[in-house]
Every structure is written in C-alpha cells, then in structure tokens.
Amino acid sequence: MDHLTDGARLPSPRGATEPYGPCVLLKHGEVVLKGRNRQRFVQRLEDNLRVALRGIGGSTWIRTPHTITVLGGQVPVEDLVARARTVIGFNAVEPALRVPSTLESVEANALTVLGDACAGRATTGFAVRVRRRDKGFALTSTQLERHLGAFLQPRIPGLRVDLTAPDVTLTVEIEHRETYLSAERHPGLSGLPVGSSGRALVLLSGGYDSPVAAHRAMRRGLACDFVHFSGAPYTNPSSVYKAYALARELNRYQPPGELHVVSLGKAQKQLAVAGAGRLQVVAQRRLMVRTACALAGATGAQALVTGDSLGQVASQTLANLAAVDQAATLPVLRPLIGWEKQEIIDQARALGTAEISVLPDEDCCSLLAPPQVSTGARLGQLRAVEKRLDLDEVVEALLANVQVMRPGQEDDAAPAVTCSVPS
C-alpha cells in the first residue's frame, strides 16, 4: 500500500512528465459551455494562467484533461493557489494530491488528505464525492464513495458521516493514469478568460467605480487598457499616482494592460471660456470620450468602459449619459449601470482597490465644475459650445502629449518556467 507522505514524490506515470504529489485543481467556469469553440477559450485560459505565474520563483507545469486544469511545480501549493485565484475563468481552486489510480493508493492517500483536513477538530461530519472519468476503474463512483466512507470513518477519530451539510468533503477525481484527492475548495473568479471577448479601453478615475467596472469587464472576457484624465497643469499629480496604483492592482487579474495619462486641464479651461457653464461637466465627459475613442485606434480597443451608475450623480442621468454616448464612435459599456454605491464600495474592498480609491487627490472632474450641473443636457446646447472650439485640434493636442505607463509589468522580469503537459 503506497502511503504518500507530505512532500514525497512518486515516479511519474508512463507518458506524463509531472510527478505525483501536491498540485492544484482548477475547475473551469463558463468555458465548459462553449461547445466547438471551447478549445480556443481553454487555450486563452492557459495563456492567462502562465502570465499569472510569472515571477513565482520556480518551474511549474500545466495540463488540461477534460473540464479541469491541473497546476503543479517546484513551488509551494499555497503560492500556486494564490496566483490561480487571480485568473478569471476558473470557478474553483482546489489544493489536491495527485496519486496513482489504484484502489490501494486512493485509500491510503485519502486517509492522509482527510486526516489533515480534520486535524484539530473534536468531531467532523464528512462526505465523499467521487467523479470517475476512467470508466475502467474497478468501482463505480457510488461504490467508491461508499467504500471510502466505510474505510475512513473508523480510522480517523471523531469522524461521522454527514451527507447533507458536511464540515469536510473529500473529492476524488479518477483519471486513466492518476487520481486527484482534495478536501479544500476556494472560490474562483469565474467568468470568461480575459481576452476571449476582445479589447477595451477603461476610463479610469481615482474613485471606487471605474476600477470595479474594469474588473467586471475583464470577467466578461475583455482585456483592458486604461486611460486617466488628469487636471494638469492646474492640479497636482496625486490623481495620476492613484490611477497607476489602481491599474497595477487591476493588472493582477489580466495580462498587464497599459495606462495612458492625458492632461486635460487646458482643454477644460477652453470649454469654460467657451461658455459651457452648467454644461461644463457633461461637455468634459464628451471630450474625454472623443479622446478615448481616438486613442482606442492605437490600442486596438473595440469599446470603452466607464464606471457610470444611473442617477448616482448629476452627470449620470439618462439624458446626460445619452449626450455623452452621442460623442462616441465606439460602444460605451457601463457594467455598473444598475449598481448602488454601497455595492460598488463592497466590491472595491473585495478587489483590493478601495484602499487606493479612498486616498485624497485633485480630481480633474472637480476642476472648473459649476455650482450646479445640468441634469438634462441638450445636444443642441452642447454642440453650440463645442462649435466655439476646433474639437479635432483639441483632441489632437491631447493625444500628442499622452504619457504611457505599464503598471505591474516590471514584475515580469523573472518569468517562471511553465510547460504544458499533453493530456
């Protein structure tokens, strides 16, 4: 009977290169529903996982049998779990043990895995769940569940069967050459692999909303670059520092995108001198959208993403949002359109962006803002203001001085050695 001790390595099975021992199971999300296109989505998922593993400090391997991805390597499992949980497209992340597909090995290693999970508990309700992909295995899934339950219960003190609400669930996944045992499960980010739906440009401010909107767009498969409009030269660089920190945090969830910084201050003053008045904020938003659409041509973006939430502030009424859309030549996506502010703040805290967003800065949106903002801007009024400027010339001047940054890409200097193992 092969009893796999912690940290041990058994010989690899014929035809595979990765060793038996600790690994991580990554359960696919929506990818499993993609039918004939599924392989393309799986490949994108693997590519994004490789990017997430860069700089991890050791060689790793990836294999994708059926509807799971298996990750392992010369790296502590907890580090692999932490990196995998930032990859959008996996429903669950499970530290596991990879063992030979024999009944004796499954029994012995199930005792180790479940024993570790129950350590320190007086009593533990447990259940066994088996998925048998190798139909040639001696027992069916149901038979093996019953067999392992009867085998484990008398060997672990305080263990009791609880099939309704177990404290610990031992999962057993049987492949042809190897079996995976796990008693721990972490939620993944689910969604579609980043990049599988195209590319977008996010209008990134320093607040709570736009970073959350960016993350929601990523979960729908959009790879994101970012554009931040600062009030320079009339404001200090604090908003740029925040935008950089936010983009760096968001790049943890995707192959790193670029941050484009546009100094909007002089153009904002031109709008004010042109008599924008109560239309100033909406006119600024239209100018931002025009500029972002022009910039998107250089980044390959097919849409813009904003953090607008309907009715949250005066500039986000339905009439004002429609007026902003009219200035765009690309679709403007608003993932948070129906979210309440507290929902957005809660999500920002979960993402790790809230601590950055709360820092003080000089936001361009408050620069030259009128005491009262129009809640029902009319296109005729906006166009009358814009006709007093040469908008094409203004946009061209803004783009001529764009500053491009690459937040997080300095972490890619020492990539891990990652290989795919044929399934």
Image (spheres, rainbow, N blue to C red):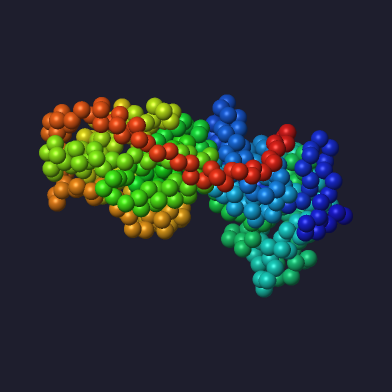
User: Where 197 falls versus 68 (above or below)?
Assistant: above
Seen at 18% across and 30% down, the residue is: 389
Work out whether residue 158 or residue 387 is closer to the camera in this orientation and state it: 387
Which residue does the image show at 71% across and 45% down from the upper left? 59
Rendered residue at 75%/67% (across/down): 156
In the displayed structure image, the side of residue 421 where residue 103 appears, left or right: right
**Where does the N terminus fall, quadrant-wise?**
bottom right
Q: Residue furthest bottom?
A: 122
Residue 373 placement, left or right of 288: left
Q: Is residue 60 above or below residue 420?
A: below
**Image quadrant for the C terminus?**
top right
Q: Nearer the viewer, residue 148 or 32?
A: 32
Q: Is residue 138 visible?
A: no
| Left or right position of 396 against 190 | left
Instruction: Name the spot of residue 177 as percent of width and height, x first.
Output: 79, 40
Tell me residue 279's x, y (percent): 16, 41
Could you say where residue 122 lies in the image, as x and y percent from the top left?
A: 67, 73
- Location of residue 418 by image quarter: top right
